Image: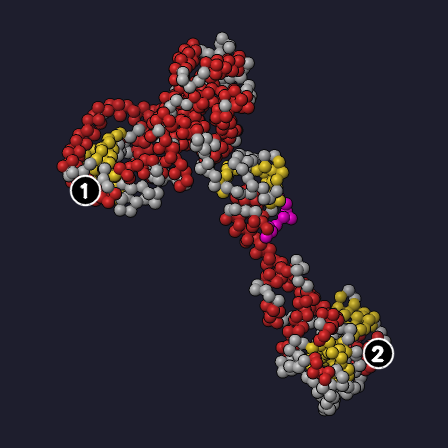
């Protein structure tokens, strides 16, 4: 061992500490183990694995001090002490945890492993200030004794740095103790440790204020003790006279607690309402609790003037956390305020150990699972005596099995439900990050969206500009935020898809020369079994439904609506004998010479006398006449061949004309349109019903609807139009 490793004072302390520890564990640890432990520590020091830190703190002295405090404040636990003494050498990798496990057992190995895990968290400096850090630390520790070691270690460190020259270091340690370790000590029922940590934190961060309060308290200690006794005496007498069984406790608040009150109330020490506090604990059956508490309250308030604004009734209506008690502040002798709490033994047990620990009823948030777990810990600490350390060995820190704590690459800390995935984490950071997430790196390794995160994972989210939420993502997430945002995004995507599908549908209907009516389409959607049109349009986009099938259903529905009065079967058309009808109104023969049937010429192809035609029987029996080469007719013939019926022209029109749409393309020359219309007007039995012209880049495209008697007249007209100068293309269109 290095001769200069210890100062004179440190060497004296080490010798004293060793003797005390050896005495405490004379029946717990063998001479061989003691010898082996000393050798490991000596060799580690000699090889430079236990050097002072940058603030000059000797780790060996620090850990020996922690070991002594553990035996004093917690009880004899050989394994905790050995773990404390070997931890630093494991951290500096002089000895591996596996070697410790082999030589000293699984329990010590587990403690050291817990300490090493927690120490890793301290590398993420930004997270130390996060309110979730203490929770993550407890989840990482896995064993309650790891947390106790760390609390006691900070207590020892705080005592060591009282006169440390580096004030920033002292301030930082005090601040960390105040927001992290003091609350943990309180939760564990280590109230003495908690009070000392708080007082020293105030001392190191505001020494002048601490000294001022301490001085005032020291000046009046005897006076305060006498004052409390003078209040208790008459109250005790009156309660006994009333026949109540009770216990009375008197106290003065800690310096830190007094300072908190001074700060909140902007008052001096002497003005603090509950600087003096008395608690009356009544022993009474459950059925008499309220009655006896109020009886005691009446006695106290008859003796002293109460401050109505400082009276709290948590017996009639307990706090949501289960806390029950009567609080009042009375004006005692010498014009001084005294807080009095009245509760039963049961209420006191609940308040101190169970559902409503003091730290919680002061307004600190917690989970019930943590409350219950902490209550069990306090019970063990307070009732088990020497057996407490052994019982603690069997307790794991599984209180946070419903949540995980995750780091960003910058060290920011996020709390998520247990089972949360990379996708949950992305949405927790920002909704846009979640919507474009394609995976991530977890502790430097690439992982998929549905990777389940573990406590302490560092996650870097990977995104893509082309990524968008998908339906299956809902099975990847556990958080409500992620689920709601995914659903919202899916709705937006579906709405966009619906618009696109609608455009596709309209384009296909236009190509088939079918007028699309929204009301008729809605009926088709319902007929296909869709409750929402967005689902219908989404299936079109994803090609789960063929647009041709939609058009077929639309045509069938249209035929049904246009010919409601016809209700005959295909078989009937074949079986009936020919019927003579008025040739002026009947120019199509259906089936085997059948006339006199109500039919309609299809608008999708506009058949003309002379065209090859077929009939299609709609679902209600109505007949629609199509050109034999009509695309719609071909689809219908393929899908419903049994509903196709033979149809021919009778050769008579009875004065009726047919509508023939014609497309013309030509040079955009002056007068060419006049030439076309002039030619049509001169034709016998030909009527120009409508015309539309679109001119672009020196060409015009026109659509004409011509009233004509038969196909021969139409063909002759088209030939004449073709011969007009400047006309490049003429054709009949469906």
Indicate left or right for 184 with 305 as reference: right
Residue at mark 1: 295
Whether pointer 2 and pointer 1 mark residues with C-beta atoms closer than 8 Å, the reply is no
Q: Residue at x 52, y 36 (%)?
A: 455
In terms of image quadrants, where is residue 347?
top left
In terms of image quadrants, where is residue 560?
bottom right
Q: Residue at x 82, y 79 (%)?
A: 715
Indicate left or right for 614 with 50 as reference: right
Q: Which is more toward the observer, 348 or 104? A: 104
Label 2 and label 1: CA atoms lie apart by 118 Å
Q: Is residue 684 visible?
A: yes
- The dot on residue 720 is 2
- The dot on residue 197 is none
In terms of image quadrants, where is residue 613?
bottom right
Q: Earlier in the sequence, mark 2 or mark 1?
A: 1
Q: Is residue 268 magenta?
A: no
Q: Which is more toward the observer, 211 or 613? A: 613
**Extent of the magenta region:** 463-471
């Amino acid at each position: 061992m290095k001769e200069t490793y210890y100062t004179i004072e440190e060497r004296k302390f080490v010798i004293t500490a060793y003797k005390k520890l050896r005495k405490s564990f004379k029946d717990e640890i063998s001479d061989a183990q003691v010898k082996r432990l000393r050798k490991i520590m000596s060799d580690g020091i000699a090889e430079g694995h236990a050097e002072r830190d940058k603030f000059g703190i000797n780790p060996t002295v620090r850990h020996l001090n922690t070991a002594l405090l553990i035996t004093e404040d917690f009880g004899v636990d050989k394994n905790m002490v050995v773990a404390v003494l070997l931890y630093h050498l494991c951290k500096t990798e002089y000895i591996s945890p596996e070697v410790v496990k082999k030589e000293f057992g699984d329990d010590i190995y587990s403690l050291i492993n817990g300490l090493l895990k927690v120490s890793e968290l301290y590398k993420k400096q930004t997270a130390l200030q996060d309110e979730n850090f203490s929770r993550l630390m407890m989840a990482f520790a896995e064993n309650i004794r790891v947390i106790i070691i760390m609390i006691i270690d900070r207590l020892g460190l705080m005592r060591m740095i009282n006169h440390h020259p580096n004030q920033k270091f002292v301030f930082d340690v005090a601040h960390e103790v105040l927001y992290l370790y003091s609350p943990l000590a309180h939760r564990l029922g280590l109230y003495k440790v908690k009070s000392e940590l708080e007082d020293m934190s105030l001392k190191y961060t505001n020494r002048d204020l601490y000294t001022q309060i301490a001085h005032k308290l020291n000046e009046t200690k005897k006076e305060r003790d006498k004052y409390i006794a003078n209040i208790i005496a008459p109250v005790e007498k009156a309660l006994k006279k009333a026949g109540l069984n009770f216990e009375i406790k008197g106290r003065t608040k800690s310096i830190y607690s007094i300072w908190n009150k001074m700060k909140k109330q902007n008052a001096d020490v002497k003005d603090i309402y509950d600087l003096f506090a008395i608690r009356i604990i009544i022993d009474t059956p459950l059925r008499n609790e309220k009655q006896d508490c109020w009886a005691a309250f009446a006695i106290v308030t008859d003796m002293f003037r109460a401050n109505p604004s400082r009276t709290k009734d948590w017996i009639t209506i307990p706090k949501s956390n289960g806390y029950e008690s009567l609080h009042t502040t009375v004006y005692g002798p010498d014009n001084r305020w005294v807080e009095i709490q009245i509760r039963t033994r049961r209420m006191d047990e609940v308040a101190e150990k169970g559902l409503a620990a003091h730290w919680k009823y002061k307004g600190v948030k917690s989970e019930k699972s943590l409350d219950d777990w902490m209550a069990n810990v306090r019970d063990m600490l307070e009732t088990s005596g020497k057996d407490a350390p052994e019982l603690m060995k069997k307790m794991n820190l599984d209180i946070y099995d419903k949540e995980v704590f995750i780091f960003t690459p910058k060290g920011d800390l996020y709390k998520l439900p247990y089972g949360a995935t990379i996708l949950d984490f992305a949405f927790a950071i920002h909704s846009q990050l979640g919507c474009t997430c394609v995976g991530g790196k977890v502790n430097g390794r690439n992982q998929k969206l549905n990777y389940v995160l573990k406590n302490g994972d560092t996650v870097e989210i990977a995104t893509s500009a082309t990524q968008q939420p998908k339906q299956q993502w809902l099975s990847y997430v556990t958080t409500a935020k992620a689920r709601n945002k995914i659903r919202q995004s899916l709705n937006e995507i579906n709405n966009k898809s619906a618009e696109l599908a609608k455009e596709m549908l309209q384009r296909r209907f236009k190509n088939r020369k079918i007028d699309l009516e929204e009301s008729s389409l809605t009926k088709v959607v319902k007929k296909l079994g869709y409750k929402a049109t967005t689902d219908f349009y989404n299936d079109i986009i994803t090609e789960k439904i063929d647009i041709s099938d939609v058009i077929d259903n639309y045509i069938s529905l249209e035929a049904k609506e246009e010919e409601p009065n016809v209700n005959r079967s295909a078989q009937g058309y074949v079986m009936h004998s020919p019927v003579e009808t008025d040739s002026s109104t009947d120019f199509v023969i259906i089936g085997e010479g059948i006339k006199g049937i109500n039919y309609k010429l299809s608008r999708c192809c506009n058949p003309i006398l002379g065209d090859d035609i077929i009939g299609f029987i709609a679902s209600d029996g109505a007949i629609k006449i199509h050109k034999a080469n009509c695309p719609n007719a071909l689809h219908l013939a393929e899908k419903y061949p049994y509903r196709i019926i033979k149809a021919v022209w009778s050769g008579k029109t009875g004065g009726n004309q047919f509508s023939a749409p014609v497309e013309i393309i030509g040079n955009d020359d002056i007068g060419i349109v006049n030439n076309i219309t002039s030619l049509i007007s001169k034709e016998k039995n030909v009527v120009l019903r409508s015309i539309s012209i679109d001119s672009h880049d020196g060409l015009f495209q026109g659509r004409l609807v011509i009233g004509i008697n038969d196909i021969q007249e139409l063909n002759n007209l088209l030939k004449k139009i073709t011969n007009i100068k400047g006309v490049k293309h003429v054709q009949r269109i469906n």
